[in-house]
Image (cartoon, rainbow, N blue to C red):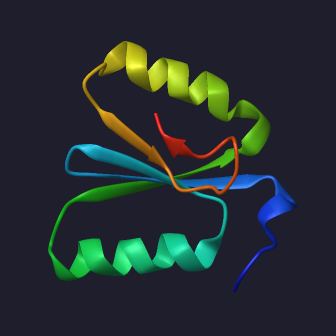
Amino acid sequence: MSWPPDHGRLYAILGADILIVFDDTDSAGDVLTMLRVAEVPYEVHVFNAAGWDEVTRLVRAVNPGLVIRDSRPGPVGGRS
């Protein structure tokens, strides 16, 4: 199932020492498949796009060394 990028949901996958954010289920599913095959423990969380800034602040407060990779295109995406 694929959603249009503007549907407002973000899929955050935490695996090993990286947090990757997607705005579509297909891309998130691809990464989940790779993590499963590699037997890397992971967590998946679904957020409302409007609340992502708050989630990012909380994650950085708890673990400031964590790499957050935002895969969304455009000015909101990119390494943070």
- Horizontally, residue 65 falls left or right of residue 26, namely left
Q: Which residue occupies 53% across, 45% down?
A: 78
Q: Quadrant of residue 38?
A: bottom left
Q: Which residue occupies 29% across, 58% down?
A: 42
User: Compared to 40, does 63 lie above or below?
Assistant: above
- Horizontally, residue 63 falls left or right of residue 9, namely left
The x, y position of residue 77, in whole percent, is 60, 46
- Horizontally, residue 29 falls left or right of residue 77, namely left
User: Compared to 62, does 79 lie above or below?
Assistant: below
User: Compared to 77, does 55 lie above or below?
Assistant: above
The x, y position of residue 1, in whole percent, is 69, 86
For this rendering, which residue is in front, 40 or 23? 23
The x, y position of residue 33, in whole percent, is 34, 81
The x, y position of residue 14, in whole percent, is 35, 50
> Seen from this angle, which residue lies furthest front?
75
> Seen from this angle, which residue lies furthest top?
61
